[in-house]
Amino acid sequence: MAERLSGGCICAAIRFTAVPVNDEMGVCHCGLCRRWSGGAGFLGVECGTAVDVENGDMLGVYKSSEYGERVFCKTCGTTLFWRMQDGSDIVVSAHAFDAPGVFRFTSEIFIDEKPDNYAFANETKKMTSAEFFAAYAAQQDPSA
């Protein structure tokens, strides 16, 4: 998917455009993502570094781990992005896009942290936290 898509927060203080890597979205079930999103997990769309933000001074940033940070609107609190602290990878909240229906729900990560009281009906690729970190490490080091 090479199309630039637009989105923003609920109060319109922040607008952005992004180029998703593909038309897929996934959910992270880790405890931090569930608390941050206030729901069943963070529904995200991989955008690499292809995200441009208008009014970036309105972005709030919370460093949630030694490598990642969560980005939100300082005014309304809308969940916007999860990103690597070095800026090398940005995952945009699927529902922050103006037309979130264009994405196919294809994957679930940190499935070992998902509470037993809900499950999605979609057929998805499911990965535990260990499987996810191993796959990410392999992407970063193709010789491994």
Image (cartoon, rainbow, N blue to C red):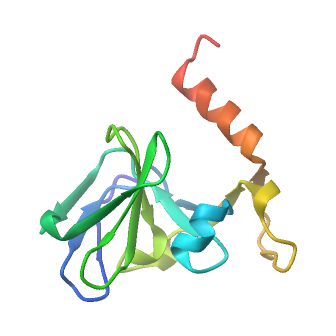
| Quarter of the view holding residue 131 | top right
Q: Is residue 68 visible?
A: yes
Query: Residue furthest toward the right?
Result: 116
Q: Position of residue 67 (x, y in %)?
A: 46, 40
The residue shown at (28%, 77%) is 8
Residue 4 sits above or below residue 85 on the image: below
| Quarter of the view holding residue 53 | bottom left
Q: Position of residue 21 (x, y in %)?
A: 44, 49
Is residue 143 shown left or right of residue 44?
right
The residue shown at (24%, 66%) is 59
The residue shown at (13%, 65%) is 57
Q: Give 87 or 46, whichever is nearer the viewer.
A: 87
Residue 130 sits above or below residue 113 on the image: above
Q: Position of residue 110 (x, y in %)?
A: 72, 54
Q: Position of residue 26 (x, y in %)?
A: 61, 61
The residue shown at (58%, 65%) is 33
Is residue 101 shown left or right of residue 121?
left
Query: Residue furthest toward the top?
Result: 143
> Where the N terminus falls, by quadrant?
bottom left
Q: Is residue 27 visible?
A: no
Is residue 36 shown left or right of residue 111?
left
> Where the C terminus falls, by quadrant?
top right
Q: Give 59 or 99, whichever is nearer the viewer.
A: 59
Residue 79 sits above or below residue 29 on the image: below
Q: How many marks?
A: 0
